[in-house]
Amino acid sequence: MTENVSTAALGSVTSSPPRARGKRSSQDAMATQEAILDAALLLFAERGYDGTSLRDIAANVGISHGIIRHHFGSKMAIWEKVATKVFEFFRSSLLPLTEVAIENSAAESGEEAFQAFQTLVSTFIRISLDKPEYARLFVQETRQENERSRFCAEQFMALHNAIGELFLEAQTASEILTKYTNDSFFYALLSLTYFKILHPTLGARSISAEVENQEMHDFIVSVLFH
């Protein structure tokens, strides 16, 4: 039995067609970019933009500084990709709930709009608690006036205004909501949700994150709607 395989034969078995190699190379590049963005998100959230360097991100991913520059060019380009990805996640999670409820508002009662608004608020709380790095990123970038803080403020307010129409529909059916304006409810929601995220050691207990998040979710909902 022959165990050795000639180089030519081995190459004919293991080599991939150019199209397959190109597809794999593209997939590898996308995976590297995603790893860079994930690492950058955590570092920006923890240290802020100014406290994070490209070398920090590279070290976190386990790649060279040059590879990051090859894929993104600059730290600001990475930050823009990270922030856009985060806001797109919120938009895709929340706005469809708003759009469907508003489209059906003519045929629905105010009570149904109120229930839809509660679902939207609950979704926002769960996303924020499950992904605390999102909240920390926003807070890091809104401590001073600059291009990044303006971007965050504009994106947040666009989301807030889009949800505002549903809030007004829900308010017609809920005496609870009459004590709020669209703005004051938004600020109360952010304050209650982000406080625990930004101060995780306050009142810390030996329970799982899942249980703690559920308890916090239920508490915030009870404060806002009761």
Image (cartoon, grey):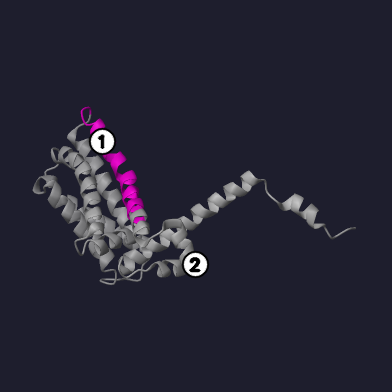
Q: Secondary structure at mark 1?
A: helix
- The amino acid marked with disc number 1 is Ala
Whether 38 is among the magenta residues is no
* Residue 226 is at least partly visible in this image: no
Q: CA distance from mark 1 to mark 2?
A: 48 Å
Name the chief secondary structure element in magenta. helix
- The answer to which of marks 1 and 2 sits earlier in the sequence is 2
- Name the residue beneath numbered marker 2: 64
Q: Give whichever of 88, 144 is nearer the camera.
A: 144
Which mark, by number, is residue 101?
1
Q: Give coordinates of residue 34: x percent, y percent.
A: 45, 56
Say whether residue 106 is magenta.
yes
Per the rendered image, the range of residues in magenta is 82-107
Mark seen at residue 153: none
Task: Please identify the residue farthest to the right as the structure is shown.
Answer: 1
Q: Amino acid at mark 2?
A: Ser
Within 10 Å of disc 1 (Cα), the crowding (few <14, some 14-19, many 20+) is many
SS for tag 2? loop
Residue at 42% in and 63% down = 39
Q: Nearer the viewer, residue 43 or 81?
A: 81
